[in-house]
Image (tube, rainbow, N blue to C red):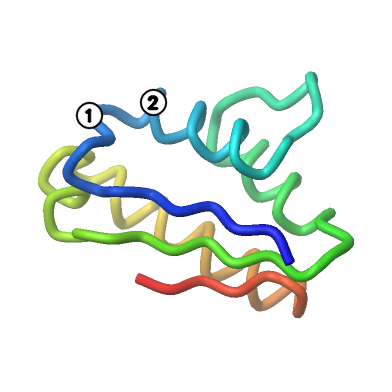
Amino acid sequence: MNYAIIEGAAVGSMDRLHRLLAEQLDFPSWYGGNLDALYDCLTDLAEETSIILFHSQALAETLGPGYGRLCRVLEDAAAENTRLHIQI
């Protein structure tokens, strides 16, 4: 099983979040670092994968409205790909 563990208080920006996810989940080189590309990569995962977000309130404060969009992408991708598990 693959894991991405994100410490919300240490993310700092949406760009940093994308870099962390890409590194931890070994996304392909074409990963665009945006929410559309994130959805595409998450729905293409072939093995069991968990994304765990710690201190989500701090992440929400950092990302502002982007946090809601991120959560929707994660939830939609998990609904599409049963191998993806999200813990917030």
Image height check: is 54 above or below 24? Answer: below
Q: Position of residue 65 (x, y in %)?
A: 23, 46
Q: Answer whether labels 1 and 2 touch (C-beta < 8 Å).
A: yes
In the rendered structure, which amino acid carries the disc numbered 2? Answer: Arg
Dividing the image into 4 quarters, which one contains the N terminus?
Answer: bottom right
Q: Cα distance, mark 1 to mark 2? A: 7 Å
Mark 2, residues whose alpha carbon is within 10 Å: few (<14), some, or many (≥20)?
few
Q: Is residue 38 left or right of residue 27?
A: left
Say above or below: 55 vs 6: below
Instruction: Identify the mark at residue 51; answer none if there is no mark.
Output: none
The foreground one among 83 and 69 is 83
- State the residue position of label 2: 16
Q: Quadrant of the C terminus?
A: bottom left
Secondary structure under tag 1 reads: loop
At which x and y percent is residue 2? 69, 59
Three-letter amino acid code of the residue under disc 1: Gly
Q: Residue at x 79, y 20 (%)?
A: 29
Tell me residue 15's x, y (percent): 41, 23
**Marker count (numbered):** 2
**Is 29 placed above or below 34 here?**
above
Give the label on residue 12, or none.
1
User: x and y percent of residue 73 in the render?
Assistant: 53, 57
Query: Quick one: SS at disc 2?
Result: helix
